[in-house]
Amino acid sequence: MSDYEVTRIGSLDRWRSHFGGFDESRSRDGRRVVDHELTMQYIGMTANALVPGEEAGYWHSHERVEELYVFLEGLGQMGLDDEVIDVEPGSVVRVGQGVWRTWRARPDSPGELRWLCIRAGGEELPHLPNDSSRAPERPMPWSD
């Protein structure tokens, strides 16, 4: 058996129906902690949805974890230390260790703010992934 797993988080318009969190007492609508469903070692991911005008309601920072926010739909804002930046579909925001962060869906957003938050820890990634192997002679599996 290969070392992979598959889960389905549903289409973007269904993300608001997710209910979850890292701690049951702080779980909320619109959050799914995917790494609680898969065997993840060095990365984590949440799928998130906020209705227009809704906010995180808290600030947080990490000592060891780096986060990457990939915004897919809606209009929002992120508080990053002493700055506020606008986010929209296609915005990708890397937030390093020690940076305070919070977010909200702007009240004038045309719909829910939806994003993935990818968290990573462990060791520093090489610029060139030099642990990979290629097999150009291996036939492709598609049977069109």
Image (spheres, helix red, strand yellow):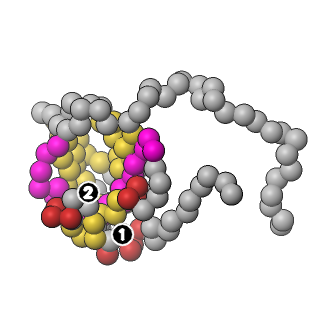
Residue lying at 39% horizontally and 39% vertically, measured from the top left: 120
Circle 1 residues within 10 Å: few <14, some 14–19, many ≥20? many
Three-letter code, disc 2: Phe
Nearer the observer, 35 or 95: 35
Disc number lying in front (2 or 1): 2
Q: Is residue 9 above or below residue 118?
A: below
Residue 106 visible: no
- The residue that label 1 is drawn on is 15
Q: CA distance from mark 2 to mark 1?
A: 17 Å
Residue lying at 63% horizontally and 26% vertically, measured from the top left: 130
Q: Is residue 13 above or below residue 73?
A: below
**Residue 50 coordinates in the image, percent (x, y):** 25, 64
94 relative position to 60: left or right: right
Snapshot quadrant of residue 86 = top left
Nearer the observer, 122 or 28: 122
Callout 1: SS: helix
Farthest residue, direction front: 1
The N terminus lies in which quarter of the figure? bottom right
Residue lying at 27% horizontally and 66% vertically, measured from the top left: 20
Q: Is residue 83 above or below residue 6?
A: above
Snapshot quadrant of residue 56 = bottom left
**Residue 108 coordinates in the image, percent (x, y):** 20, 62
The secondary structure that dominates the magenta segment is: loop
Q: Is residue 65 above or below residue 102?
A: above
**Residue 72 coordinates in the image, percent (x, y):** 40, 56
Q: Earlier in the sequence, mark 2 or mark 1?
A: 1
Counting every numbered tag in the picture gives 2
Nearer the observer, 8 or 114: 8
- The residue that label 2 is drawn on is 22
The residue range painted magenta reads 41-60
Q: Is residue 8 magenta?
A: no
51 relative position to 90: left or right: left
